[in-house]
Every structure is written in C-alpha cells, then in structure tokens.
C-alpha cells in the first residue's frame, strides 16, 4: 500500500514508518519538524516538509502522493502544557486535524489511522479500561483527542471516510535505530535514563500520595514495536472503530525507577514533588477488542524488555537525534 504518515518524524510515527517500509509498503512522511527530527526520517521514505495549519500544503502532499491511507500522528501531547495553554492544543489537535480530513475528502483519500490516547478516559470507573469505559477527560489534551474522534465518526457517517482510532496507553522502548527524544523530555522512561546517563541530576516524581500501592501513578507501558504493528493491522480493518492499546499490566513510577536502576546498574536519584494537575492515578488497558477483531498480539510485554531496548538506544545515541 501507499501510506502518507503525518507526523512521521516523531517518536511513534518514525517507528511506524520504519516497520511499514520493512514490510514493503510505499511511505511518504509529512512533518513540520517542530516536534519531530529530520534524522528520524527513514531514508527510504519520501519526505515532505509541511504544516497541517496550512490546508494547501497538506492537500498538495495528498495530491502528489495519492496514498491508499493516512496515518495521523501529528499532535501536541503534553498534559501539563495543555492545562496552561489549551488554545494551542485545540488549534493543533482539532483545527489542524480538520484541515487534514477536508484535504483527504478533496483528494479522494478515504482511510485514516488516528493516533488517539487513553487520556480521553480521565480517572476511570474501573480498570482495566475497555472501549465501553465512559470518556471523561480531565485535561485539554485528552479533550482535544476525544473531540477529533467524534469528528471522525461524523465524517464516516456523512462522507464515508473510514477510520481506526488507536487509543495508546504509554508508548515506550526503541528499535535499533529509532528511539524517544522529545524537546523537552517529559516521558518517564527516557527521563529516568537521562539521569542514568548523567544528563540530569535527578528524576522528579510528581505525586506520592495517590491511591496506589506505593503512592505513585500507575501506567500501562507498551513497546513501540507492538504499537506500530497495531497500526499496520489497522490498515486491514473492514470497518471504522476504536481500539485500546496496552498490555493489561501496570507499573508505578517507583517501579519504573527501580527497573531502570537494575538494568542500567547506575544510581538514579529522585526528588518528590506535588501532584501535577490533570494526571489520573491509574491507567491500565484492556486490549481484548483489538486482539479479537484484528488479531493483534503484543510480543514485548515485559517492562524490563521495554526498558532494555530504550537503554540500548540511549547508550548508542546519548544526545538523541542531535548527533
């Protein structure tokens, strides 16, 4: 298939592009490189530098590449920032996403795989979280993703634009050449590993009084390769739908730190800080729906395996893509 990967220079988009190319698909990447990295763009892909805020740019990219489907990863994704600047999140994650959908309609592209999030559930009534769990986001980031999911539903009903929305829990880990390098780095596992590398003095733990066994937030970590495989399977979905993606297990912040200490063999100091607004205490996925309907089978479910792959990448690229 021919796939246009929007946001393909970012962490998840770059790994999905790599796996698509490995499987013989033709890939074009559309990215403005504000959050992404030029060095994360696979040399086998056709790279188009552009911004979803400019409707003409994305329409031109779709017209020139004529993809069978779009994978849409381009979004702002920092919960604390969304609590400070909601406008930035609604403009980019919703308004700019509409530019993409409308350009798809004009150019005759009728299939999209959407990078969604577990943040749209908010603090869940029960865990693990399945697709019937009520959506009650407690931050503008989650609200922006939920809004776009609803828009996708209407575009399917009215225009016949087929979609699969994949609701990630916590993506982590790396391939041999592609890893996690954000500006700034706010994700837990790479932040801990930067302490192990001596690039940070300590790890700040936000909130130690949650209703969890050790008082810190619990998250469901999914290996980036398993996540990418789910996107490729979604290309074969026969109907629109929503799928949760996780391993069904959860690890607390303290457990992640302990695993990183064990795997790196290095001292990792921590500092306890107050809770951040917008952080649910526990997010664990049920992925039974995508397993049953699309045949997804995660291969790297162990937290140690995820951290080992991330540590190998960070040791190889200690300064990330800046090298």
Image (cartoon, rainbow, N blue to C red):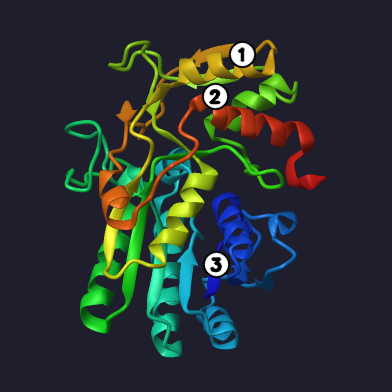
Q: Where is residue 228 in the image (x, y as percent from the top left)?
A: 50, 52
Q: Position of residue 145 (x, y in %)?
A: 35, 55
Classify residue 28 by image quadrant: bottom right
Residue at mark 1: 262
Q: Earlier in the sequence, mark 3 or mark 2?
A: 3
Measured along the vertical axis of the image, is residue 75 above or below residue 266? below
Nearest to the eye among marks 3 and 1: give it. Answer: 1
Give the position of the C terminus as an image quadrant: top right
Classify residue 204 by image quadrant: top right
Label at residue 204 = none
Residue in front for this viewpoint, 109 or 152: 109
Instruction: Identify the element where label 3 is drawn.
Output: strand
3D distance between C-alphas at marks 3 and 2:
30 Å
Label at residue 304 = 2
Measured along the vertical axis of the image, is residue 221 above or below residue 115? above
Instruction: Identify the element where label 1 is drawn.
Output: helix
Q: Mark 2 and mark 3 in contact (Cβ < 8 Å)?
A: no
At x 27% / y 51%, what residue is drawn? 292
At x 38% / y 67%, what residue is drawn? 236
Instruction: Identify the element where label 2 is drawn.
Output: helix
Label at residue 5 = 3
């Amino acid at each position: 298939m021919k796939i246009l990967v929007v946001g393909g220079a970012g962490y998840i988009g770059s790994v999905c592009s790599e796996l698509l190319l490995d499987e013989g698909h033709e890939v074009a990447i559309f990215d403005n490189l504000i959050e992404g990295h030029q060095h994360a763009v696979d040399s086998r892909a056709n790279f188009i530098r552009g911004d979803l805020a400019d409707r003409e740019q994305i329409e031109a990219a779709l017209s020139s590449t004529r993809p069978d489907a779009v994978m849409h990863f381009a979004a702002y994704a920092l919960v604390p920032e969304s609590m400070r600047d909601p406008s930035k999140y609604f403009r980019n994650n919703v308004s700019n996403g509409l530019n993409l959908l409308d350009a798809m309609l004009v150019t005759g592209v009728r299939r999209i795989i959407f990078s969604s999030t577990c943040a749209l559930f908010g603090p869940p009534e029960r865990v693990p979280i399945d697709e019937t769990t009520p959506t009650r986001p407690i931050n503008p980031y989650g609200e922006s993703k939920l809004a776009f999911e609803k828009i996708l539903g209407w575009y399917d009903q009215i225009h016949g634009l087929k979609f699969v929305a994949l609701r990630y829990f916590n993506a982590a880990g790396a391939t041999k050449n592609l890893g996690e390098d954000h500006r700034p780095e706010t994700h837990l596992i790479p932040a801990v590993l930067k302490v192990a590398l001596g690039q940070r003095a300590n790890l700040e733990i936000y909130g130690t009084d949650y209703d969890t066994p050790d008082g810190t937030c619990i998250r469901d970590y999914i290996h980036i390769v398993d996540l990418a495989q789910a996107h490729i399977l979604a290309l074969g979905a026969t109907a629109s739908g929503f799928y949760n993606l996780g391993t069904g297990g959860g690890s607390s912040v303290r457990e992640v730190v302990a695993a990183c200490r064990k795997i790196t063999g290095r001292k990792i100091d921590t500092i306890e800080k107050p809770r951040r607004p917008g952080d649910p205490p526990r997010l664990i996925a049920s992925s039974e729906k995508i397993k049953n309907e699309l045949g997804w089978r995660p291969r790297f479910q162990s937290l140690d395996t995820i951290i080992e792959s991330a540590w190998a990448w960070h040791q190889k690229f200690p300064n990330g893509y800046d090298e």
